[in-house]
Each structure stands twice: as structure tokens, then as C-alpha cells.
Image (tube, rainbow, N blue to C red):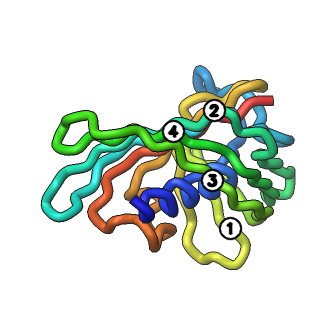
């Protein structure tokens, strides 16, 4: 389960550095990405195989004080992360196994560049060549909700099981 803790921490960092877009005129996509966004919720759902056993998980964090991202007009961003708790429910072979509350305590500031193409948001952390790709579900002047899966952010995790299938949804508000 230590790998899952590292995985959840990585998801937080990706969510913090993955929240941008411009207006594309779609319903629910009419807000501006520019400015400060506070991370209000992260939902992580997925499965992985361990020793031939299927483990499903769903993690939720909704007290995200100190976690935010600012998108600038020059297509750069700066993101801050602060400690938060994520409650993770595990099912083994479809049977509820246990719930674990994981403290995510990485304090760091990240920065990089962003670009938007339609409802896709592409994020590049400073010093990292690969881009992360997120799908924007909602972008209004007060809410940014987006998601990504293991295929769109797969090259960013060294500590998760290689066979993990997951989706992370992040909600940001202002």
C-alpha cells in the first residue's frame, strides 16, 4: 500500500499543475482559466493487480487548504501544495476490505507552462519534457473540473503499479 500513498501524492501534484484552459464556447466551458484557483476536491478511482489479486480503490480528499494554482496570461502557472488527508476505500476481489486515511504532506511549489486545445488542457512542469493531458468537464468563472487517466499522465509515476488503471478528477474553485 506504500506505492498507493506515493501514487496519491503524485496525483495531487498533477492536479495542482493541471488546471488550465481558455474559453472555447462550449456549454459549461465559458469561464476564463486565468487567475487563482483553489483545489477543493480530488477523487481518485482505479484498480491494480497485486499477486494475482484485483484491488480496487477510491480516494477522496476535500479539505484542500493551501493547495492552489495560478494561471497567467503568458501561459505559465505556479502551483502550491500543502498537507491534506485523503480517505481511500479498498476493495479486494470486489469485497470491501478496509478504509485508510492517508496524510499527503508534501510541501512544494511547482511551476511550468500550460496550453489549451478545445476541452483538452496540456500541462508541462518546468524541467520536464513530457506533457500531461487533462479533459476539462466544467470551466465557469467559479469552477474548474477536469479529469485524466493513466494513459494521459502515465509517464509521470514511478511509484505506482505498472498495471494500474485509474482516473483522477480534480475540482478547483474561486
> Are dots 1 and 2 in contact, CB under 8 Å?
no
Task: Kindly report the distance in space between the C-alpha atoms of the residues bearing marks 4 and 3.
Answer: 11 Å
User: In x, y percent, where is residue 113?
Assistant: 73, 63
Work out whether 3 lies above or below 17.
Answer: below
User: In x, y percent, where is residue 105?
Assistant: 68, 56
> Are dots 3 and 1 in contact, CB under 8 Å?
no
Residue at (76% x, 61% y) in the render: 107
* Image quarter (top left, top right, bottom left or bottom right) of the C terminus: top right
Q: Quadrant of residue 4?
A: bottom left
User: In x, y percent, where is residue 130?
Assistant: 55, 72
Q: Could one spot residue 119 in this view of the protein?
A: no
Instruction: Please report whichever mark, 1 or 2, sits nearer to the chain's N-terminal start.
Output: 2
Q: The residue tagged with tag 2: helix, strand or loop?
A: loop
Pair 3/1: label in front: 3
Residue assigned mark 4: 87
Residue assigned mark 2: 62
Q: Does 22 sit left or right of 129 as displayed?
A: right
Residue assigned mark 1: 125
Task: Kindly report the distance in space between the C-alpha atoms of the residues bearing marks 3 and 1.
Answer: 20 Å
Task: Kindly report the distance in space between the C-alpha atoms of the residues bearing marks 4 and 1.
Answer: 27 Å
Q: Residues within 10 Å of mark 1 (few under 14, many from 20)?
A: many
Residue assigned mark 3: 104
Residue at (51% x, 38% y) in the render: 87
Residue at (17% x, 64% y) in the render: 51
Between 94 and 163, the one nearer to me in the picture: 94
Task: Kindly report the distance in space between the C-alpha atoms of the residues bearing marks 1 and 2.
Answer: 24 Å
> Are dots 4 and 1 in contact, CB under 8 Å?
no
Task: Kindly report the distance in space between the C-alpha atoms of the residues bearing marks 3 and 2.
Answer: 12 Å
Q: The residue tagged with tag 4: helix, strand or loop?
A: strand
Amino acid at each position: 500500500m506504500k506505492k498507493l500513498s506515493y501514487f496519491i501524492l503524485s496525483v495531487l501534484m498533477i492536479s495542482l499543475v493541471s488546471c488550465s484552459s481558455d474559453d472555447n464556447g462550449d456549454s459549461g466551458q465559458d469561464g476564463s482559466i486565468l487567475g487563482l484557483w483553489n483545489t477543493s476536491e480530488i477523487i481518485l478511482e482505479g484498480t491494480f493487480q497485486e499477486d494475482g489479486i484485483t484491488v480496487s480503490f477510491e480516494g477522496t480528499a476535500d479539505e484542500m487548504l493551501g493547495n492552489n494554482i495560478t494561471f497567467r496570461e503568458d501561459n505559465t502557472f505556479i502551483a502550491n501544495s500543502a498537507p491534506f488527508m485523503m480517505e481511500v476505500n479498498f476493495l479486494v476481489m470486489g469485497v470491501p476490505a478496509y478504509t485508510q486515511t492517508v496524510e499527503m504532506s508534501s510541501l512544494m511549489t511547482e511551476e511550468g507552462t500550460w496550453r489549451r486545445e478545445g476541452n483538452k488542457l496540456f500541462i508541462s512542469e518546468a524541467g520536464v519534457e513530457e506533457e500531461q493531458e487533462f479533459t476539462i468537464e466544467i470551466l465557469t468563472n467559479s469552477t474548474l473540473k477536469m479529469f485524466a487517466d493513466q494513459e494521459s499522465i502515465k509517464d509521470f509515476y514511478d511509484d505506482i503499479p505498472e498495471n494500474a488503471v485509474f482516473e483522477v478528477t480534480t475540482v478547483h474553485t474561486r
